[in-house]
Amino acid sequence: MTKITADHRGRSAFVYIRQSTADQLLYNPESRRRQYGLADRARQLGWTTVEVIDDDLGRSGGGVNRPGFERRLAAICEGRVGAVFAIEASRLARNGRDGHTLIEFCALVGTIIVDEDGTYDPRHPNDRLLLGMKGTMSELELSLFRQRSHEALKQKARRGALFLGVAAGYVRIGHDRIEKDPDQRVQDALRLVFTKFTELQSVRQVHVWLRDEGIRLPVACHKAAEGRSIAWRLPLYNTVHNILTNPVYAGAYAFGRTEQGKRRGRPQARQSRRAAPIGRMGRAAHGSARGLYLLERVREAPADDCRQCDR
């Protein structure tokens, strides 16, 4: 390969390894073996110093927290890298900003990029154009994957079969159905919250009464090692409010109650929004018209009730 010179071989070869998700790490080991095999290819091409960067395993290429990417970019800026190896040039970055930054610095210090298809020198206009096109197509591909996944979730939600999380008081049956938790203690605790709200007509008063009486409420916890479990805790105001405003306890299925966006390049906290129930859950939830009426009463509670909870 004429693009590889003695100057390139005199510096280090960096092999960048990445898989986007934890599931890929678990179920797709062959891709990881192929990427680690690039170190042998670098030695066959004449490099004696080969460094493998696998800090970004399990991290999306479109994310902002990628220590491996930052370490590789810092080494390139220091002029220590003669070539960057990747299984595909598009794997180096999944957003245009990072991709163009990498290409720009490689061109400044004379670092080449090598993948399974060939060798690219960012100082050459044709190679730079090809790398840019690959990066643009990769970014478009990621956007299309995200759009298709979101539309598939919305389609499943329209059928009332999407359960990303199951509230305390219910258990998942199969992939698209939930039933009441058979634990009577859980049912009694949740029923008490609705009974006291009917009596006191105030979310804050219900919260204060539960705390004064030392009554713990069930909270659904999710841990990777243990799965879903129920923990009993003294309630916070938000815990009580979420129970009283969750349509599932009225026997209704709703989707899109919260939304998440980005602001100034950082993830924005989930913002609650009012979403009307889009379907009945049927006999599984034992919902009633009275439950929906109570849900509306809580939603229409005076704003002062919410403000006083922080005092």
Image: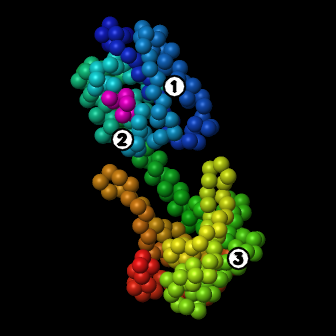
Task: Tell me which residue sits at (50%, 73%) in the image.
Answer: 238
The quadrant in which the N terminus is found is top left
> Can you identify the residue that label 2 sits on?
95
Q: Point out residue 108 in the picture as x, y percentages from the top left corner.
A: 23, 24
| Camera-nearest residue between 84 and 194 | 194
Residue 285 left/right relative to 88: right
> Can you identify the residue that label 1 sits on?
35
Mark 2: amino acid: Asn
Task: Tell me which residue sits at (51%, 52%) in the image.
Answer: 149
Residue 284 seen in render? no
Q: Which residues are magenta?
A: 69-74
- Above or below residue 150? Residue 85 is above
Q: Point out residue 278 in the picture as x, y percentages from the top left corner.
A: 54, 74
On residue 187, the disc is 3
Labels 3 and 2: the sequence-earlier one: 2
Tell whether label 3 touches label 1 (CB within 8 Å).
no
